[in-house]
Amino acid sequence: MDVVARLVAQDLTDRLGQPFIVENRTGAGGSIGTEVAARARPDGETFLVGSPGNMAIGPAMMRNLSYDVGRDFVPVSHLVTFPQVLVVSPSLPVRNLAELVAYSKSNPGRLNYASSGVGATNHLAMEMLRAATGLAATHVPYRGGLVTLQAILSNDVQMCIEGILTLPPFLADNRLRAIAVTGAERSALMPDVPTVAETVPGFDAGAWVMLFAPAGTPAPIIEKLSSEVRTSLAKPAIRERLAELGATVTGTTAEQAATIHRQELEKWRRAVEASGAVAG
């Protein structure tokens, strides 16, 4: 999120002569920064860079949020989506998703999967996958992405879903095996790895980045920023850099972003319910 925000912010600054400053407000799964943006004056001075974590999963999990993402924000543009990848231990005798599901069913209780924590995007993406395929595996939460990969290497667990950029070194020397990409399309970084959707039509659990404005921000400001963001994302240098990061660039209108966000809210709500993950 930070890299995407800074790439776009710098280009907007250079082109428009108006400084766009990226301010990280971390904590509580993103809810602290999200609350700051929700309470900001809707004057075109403050915007929010959102992800599934703070703008879809958090609202479904956390009962005591002081804001409502549907009421307090207006989507400006869907910027990019980052695919995640289902990886398994090479010790498993499986080469694709269908074989993994069949193996899990014929070996009940044997398989575990790691995540970077209860309610994390990779946890809920796996729960979506389990609901869609019948994959039999027990959740083992850890703290952080690289720890989940280490858990597979030490054979404490047999699989996980992880961000695409962390995986190439492990795949190159066959310490991990890539089974499927969770996004709607194959990744240019791993063109030979099929998508889950090739086995489960319609499956999409990518990690997106969207830009939001506080509710009440004048429509002309939202439309202007949406247009300028799309101009930035169309620049070859920016697209090349984002492609290096494994991102699929979208750059939608505000109206398209609103439709996508409604769909994502429902999708991740169902995933949270299926997982039983609930926070305070």
Image: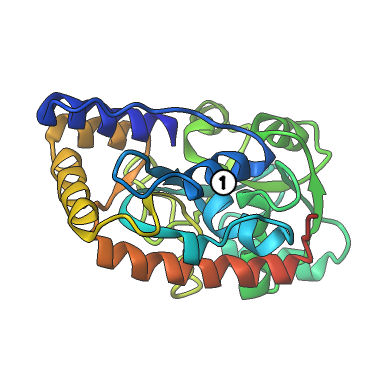
Compared with residue 49, is residue 201 higher up or lower down, i.e. above or below? below
User: Which one is nearer the viewer's eye here, 178 or 129?
Assistant: 129
For the point 12% across and 31% down, the residue is 16
Where does residue 208 sit, x and y in percent of width and height?
A: 43, 51
Does residue 15 appear anywhere in the picture?
Answer: yes
Q: Quadrant of residue 217?
A: bottom left
Q: How is the image coloured?
A: rainbow
Does residue 135 appear anywhere in the picture?
Answer: no
Q: Is residue 72 left or right of residue 254?
A: right
Where does residue 254 sit, x and y in percent of width and height?
A: 26, 61
Where does residue 182 sit, x and y in percent of width and height?
A: 49, 56
| Residue at the outermost right position | 109
For the point 70% across and 41% down, the residue is 116
**For the C terminus, which image quadrant?**
bottom right
Residue, disc 1: 35
Q: Quadrant of residue 44?
A: top left
**For the N terminus, which image quadrant?**
top left
- Amino acid type, residue under disc 1 in the picture: Glu
For the point 69% across and 42% down, the residue is 89
Compared with residue 10, is residue 164 higher up or lower down, i.e. above or below? below
User: Which one is nearer the viewer's eye here, 215 or 156?
Assistant: 215
Q: Is residue 222 left or right of residue 175?
A: left
Q: Secondary structure at mark 1?
A: helix
For the residue carrying disc 1, how many other residues have a C-alpha within 10 Å: few (<14), some (14-19), or many (20+)? some
Where does residue 30 sit, x and y in percent of width and height?
A: 59, 42
User: Which one is nearer the viewer's eye here, 146 or 276?
Assistant: 276
